[in-house]
Image (cartoon, grey):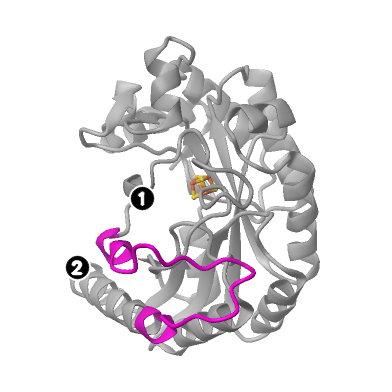
Amino acid sequence: MQQIYTYGQYLKDKFGSKVYKVGINISGFTCPNIDGTVAKGGCTFCENDSFSASTNQVQTLKGFHLNLNSTTNPYLDKQLQQLSLQFDAISKRQKQEYGAQKFIVYFQSFTNTYAPFETLKALYEKALSFPDVVGLSIGTRSDSITDETLAYLGELTKKHEIWIEFGIQSVYDATLERINRGHDAANVKEWIIKSKKAGLNVCGHLIFGLPGEDTQMMLETAKQAYEWGIDSVKYHPLYVVKRTALANEFSRGEFTPISEEEYLDVLMQAIKMKPDSVSVQRVTAGINNDSLLAPDWCRDKNRQIKNINKALSPLGLKY
Ligand code: SF4
C-alpha cells in the first residue's frame, strides 16, 4: 500500500523531521463576510465557535475588530502577547506529547490578512522569531489580501516556509452565492495565481456536498483548483452546526447533507485526478460535540479515516 503524498511528508522531506502546525487565534481579527464589509452573517455554514483554536481569547477584545481600512491598532501589544502565549502553550504540549522539534505557526481563525499591513507584519515577524519555527501558514479569503501584503509575503518566502490558505469551496458562482460566500470563483482564481507568482505556497480548501452540487460539479472544482496551481489541498465534507444559516435551511428541509458513500466516492475521484505533486493536508472534517446537527457520520473522525482507508485500498493507497 502506498502512502498518499501528505503535507506532513512534504515538510518532513524538506526539513528532515516532522514539522508541527501550531494553530493560533488572534483577538481583533474578523472576516469581511461577517463584519458587513462584504456581507453580514458569514458563509451559511460558518459558526465561529466551531473553530478548533481557543475562542476565549477572541472574546477579550469584544467590540474591537480590525479591517483593511483600520489606521490604528491600540491592541497590537496585546495581540503580540497573545501570539506568544498561545505559541508557547501549544508548542510545549506538542514537544511533550510528540517530541516535536520544528513548527509552522498557523494563523487559523477568521481572515488573517484582513488587518492593517503594519499589524500583519508585526505578527508574522514575531511568529517567525519564535525558536524552531520554520515558517507560517496563513488562512484567509481571496478578497481580503492586498498586493502590498502579497509582495511582503513573497519576500519572506526567500528565508522561510510561507503558505497561504484560501477557501476555494466551489468554482460555481451560483453555489458561492447560495452559501453567501461574498466573492466569486474568478476572485479566488486570480489571487491563487498571483500568490503563486509571488512565490508563495498555496493550500486550497475544497468543500464537497455544498447545496445544489452533484458529484460532477465537485470534481470540476477539484480539477480547476489543481489547474490553478495549488500546492496542497484540504478536502472537507459540508456538515451542519447549530446557530448557522445552514442549520435553518437544514431544519426547513432545504438542505440534505452529503452521505458518507457519496463523499467517499467524490473524494476517491478527486484524489485519483490530483497531480502527484499536490500534497494532501486533510481528507475529511467533522466535529464531535453537541453543535453538530448533521450528518452523523461526521462525528467520529477515527471511523471516517478508517472508511477512507478502506475506500483507498483498491487504489493501492492509504492515508
Ligand atoms: S470566510 Fe471563513 S470566517 Fe468568514 S464567514 Fe466564511 S467561513 Fe466564516
Query: Residue 170 at what x, y percent from top left?
Result: 65, 34
Q: Residues within 10 Å of mark 2 (few under 14, many from 20)?
A: few
Q: Quadrant of residue 268?
A: top right
Residue under the point 46% across and 87% down: 126
Looking at the picture, which amino acid does disc 2 mark? Glu
Tell me which segment is drawn in magenta. Answer: 54-79
Q: Which mark is residue 51?
A: 1
Please say whether residue 174 is one of the residues in the magenta stretch. no
Residue 18 position in % (x across, y down):
40, 69
Residue 67 within the segment the image draws in magenta? yes
Q: Amino acid at mark 1?
A: Phe
Q: Is residue 46 left or right of residue 307?
A: right
Q: Earlier in the sequence, mark 2 or mark 1?
A: 1
Give the CA separation, mark 2 to mark 1.
22 Å
Q: Nearer the viewer, residue 245 or 206?
A: 245
Q: Nearer the viewer, residue 242 or 286?
A: 242
Q: Which mark is residue 159?
A: none
Up the image or down, 135 lies above or below 23; here it is below
Depth order, front residue of 11/220: 220
Q: Is residue 180 above or below residue 27?
A: above
Which residue is at 54% across, 43% downward?
40
Q: Secondary structure at mark 1?
A: loop
The spot of residue 165 in percent (x, y) is 58, 57
Q: CB at mark 2 closer than 8 A to ligand 1?
A: no
- Left/right placement of residue 270 relative to residue 186 reads left
Q: Which residue is mark 2?
A: 97
In x, y percent, where is residue 107?
46, 66
**Furthest residue toward front:** 63
Disc 2 element: helix
